[in-house]
Every structure is written in C-alpha cells, then in structure tokens.
Image (tube, rainbow, N blue to C red):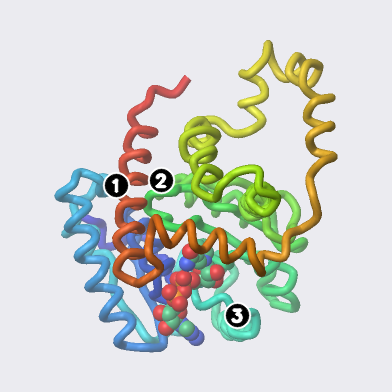
Amino acid sequence: MASPAADVVVIVGSGLIGRSWAMLFASGGFRVKLCDIEQQQVTDALENIRKEMTFLEQSGSLKGSLGAQDQLSLISGCLNIQEAVEGALHIQECVPENLELKKKIFAQLDQIIDDQVVLSSSTSCLLPSQLFAGLAHVQQCLVAHPVNPPYYVPLVELVPHPETAPATVDRTHALMRKIGQSPVRVLKEMDGFVLNRLQYAVISEAWRLVEEGIVSPSDLDLVMSDGLGMRYAFIGPLETMHLNAEGMLSYCDRYSEGMKRVLKTFGPIPEFSGATVEKVNQAMCLKVPADPEHLAARRRWRDECLQRLAKLKRQMPSQ
Ligand code: NAI
C-alpha cells in the first residue's frame, strides 16, 4: 500500500505533459496533486490516467512497484494551487508554452512557496533567465524539460537559471532518478537546450538533402529509422565514434579530415516553405494521411514501439 505520509508533488496544468508527470511521480510512490484552472480538464485528466494505468498494468508495462490501483489513489485533482503547494516537495509547471502565462504563474507561486520546495518548469524552449527573472526564490527554480511521451522516453533536461542553487539541480536529479527518468545536466542555459539543438541539426540537413534532390523524403526517414536511429537508441554519437574505430583518438585521427570536408558542404538554414514543404508533405501524407484518426493511430503505434523499446532497454544487461 502507498504510504499516507508520502511526499507531495504538485503538477500545475493537467494537459498532455502534466498527466504524464502525474503518472511518473505516482509510480515513484509520491502523492500527486494535479492542478488546473478548468474542472473539466482535471476530470478528463484523472479519467485518462485511470484508463492508461489500467492498460499499462494489463500489458505489463506499469512503472514502479505499486499496482495501478495504489498509484491511482496517490493522485488527486485540485483547482486551488495555494492550498496544494503547502508543504510540497516539488512543483512541476506544465501550462501552455507562453512566456507571459508562465511568468505570471511563477510570480504567483513565488509569493506563496516556502524555502524548501523546488519550482520546476516543463518548458520546451523558454530560457530559465526569462522564466525566473526577479523571483525571490530563484535559487529553487530550474527547467526540467521532458521528452514526449515522457512515460516511454525517459530523458529529462535539467537547465538552471544562472542563480539556481547547485543543491536544487542535485535534488531534482535525484528525484528524476527515483521516478525512473534519465536526467541530464545542461550546465549553462542555451537556446534549444541540448535535445532540440541536436534535433534541429538533423532536421536541417534532412531538409537540405531532400531540397537538393539527393534523396526522397521517405528514404531520408529510413536512413534514420533503419540506420542511425538503431544504434542511437543505445549509444550516443560520441560513443559511436569511440566504438567505430580503435577508440576516440583513432576515430578522430582517421575520420576528422573527411568529417570536416563533408561538414563544409552543409548549406544555409532552410526556409521550410515553398516547393520543398509541398514535396515533403505529400510524401508524409502518402504514408500517414494528416487527418486526426490516421495521425492518432500512427501515434499509438509509435508509442507501442517506444514502450517495447523501453522494456528491451530495461532488460538489456548494463556493461
Ligand atoms: P496542454 O495544452 O496539453 O496542457 C496545458 C494545461 O495547462 C491545460 O490543461 C490548461 O487548462 C492548463 N492551464 C492553463 N493555464 C493554467 C493556469 N493558469 N493554471 C493551471 N493550469 C493552467 O500543454 P502540454 O502539451 O501539456 O505542454 C505543457 C508544457 O510542457 C509546455 O510548456 C510545453 O512546451 C512543454 N512540453 C510539451 C511537450 C509536448 O510534446 N507536448 C514535450 C515537452 C515539454
């Protein structure tokens, strides 16, 4: 049974990401207060979480050591943030990606929180220096950026404000590990953090290759899903270099000139418009028509693949 004295985590915003965080924290045995401004949103979120957890338990993919019923009993909905945050361990903000809205919420929270709680934002691309500027509790603030869908893709980027206390990052790192996520420390804030910078570099070159007629859109995607992506699910680009020669030094010795030669041929930032967007869109729609039903079905398939991959990664012996 879940302990009634479990630490409290408050989630502000019960949309797609807020629901996932709620499930993850409950899987770690935390009591979760899921807050929103709309009662209907909270009701829908709790119902959606109940269905998801029941499905995950039946398919053997529920995280944590508690059963679905115990995890569900740890999550409650709320509309009064002031009451919810009292004595909380951690607050995870998940409202829409709008700087003014987020700043307003952090300013409100700054007035009511104590000196112990960590105040964390799920923002995908707003910088901590914009979000937390001028807050009295800035030392307790950071960004903890998850990856969609967070239940199956465990990475969380921790990005501090220049004035965030190192203990805030350490505590959040430990908390993320405790709920089974895979936190990384972004040591200084940087537009796009790390994940999106890598992602945009890949998208950018993918776009140029299609634009220049080097490869078709569907073959381009295959290069990633049946090529690079196969090993990137287990080892990153730097370890790939290390293993693809007799160690990193040997790789740089052998391949640096070739890499630099190719890199010099990379073109400018694409416009992502015009004839190329039509060509790419046509190819994507041929594979997955862009109506809500087909997109939802393909997302369900993607999530099932990710769920099985996550299981495989857990089962693989670590070296
Ligand atoms: P969403 O639109 O699904 O959910 C936002 C929720 O916040 C809604 O339930 C809304 O009613 C609620 N809300 C609005 N104002 C509020 C307020 N003042 N107080 C409490 N609740 C309020 O948004 P989603 O997709 O969950 O995104 C949330 C955050 O997570 C954004 O910053 C987004 O950039 C970030 N994120 C999103 C990812 C994604 O793939 N959707 C991935 C990683 C991060």
Quarter assignment of residue 158: bottom right
26 horizontally vs 102: left or right: left
Q: Which mark is residue 277?
A: none
Q: What's the amino acid at mark 1?
A: Gly
Cα distance, mark 3 to mark 2?
A: 28 Å
Residue furthest top in the image: 246
Does residue 213 appear left or right of residue 230 in this picture?
right
Mark 3, residues whose alpha carbon is within 10 Å: few (<14), some, or many (≥20)? few
Q: Can residue 117 be seen in this view?
A: no
Element at badge 1? Answer: loop
Please tell me whether mark 3 or mark 2 is closer to you in this view. Answer: 3
Which is more toward the observer, 33 or 136? Answer: 33
Badge 2 marks a residue whose secondary structure is loop
For residue 312, above or below residue 20: above
The residue under label 3 is which amino acid type?
Asn
Residue drawn at x 27%, y 78% as measured from the top left: 44
Q: Kindly identify the residue that appears in the image at 49 percent across and 40 percent down.
A: 222
19 is higher (above) or lower (below) than 187: below
Amino acid type, residue under disc 2 in the picture = Gly
Contact check, label 1 and label 2, Cβ < 8 Å: yes
* Label 1 Cα neighbours within 10 Å, binned few <14 / some 14-19 / many ≥20: some
Mark 3 or 1: in front is 3
Q: Tag 3, which secondary structure?
A: loop
Q: Nearer the viewer, residue 4 or 33?
A: 33
Q: In x, y percent, where is residue 295?
A: 36, 64
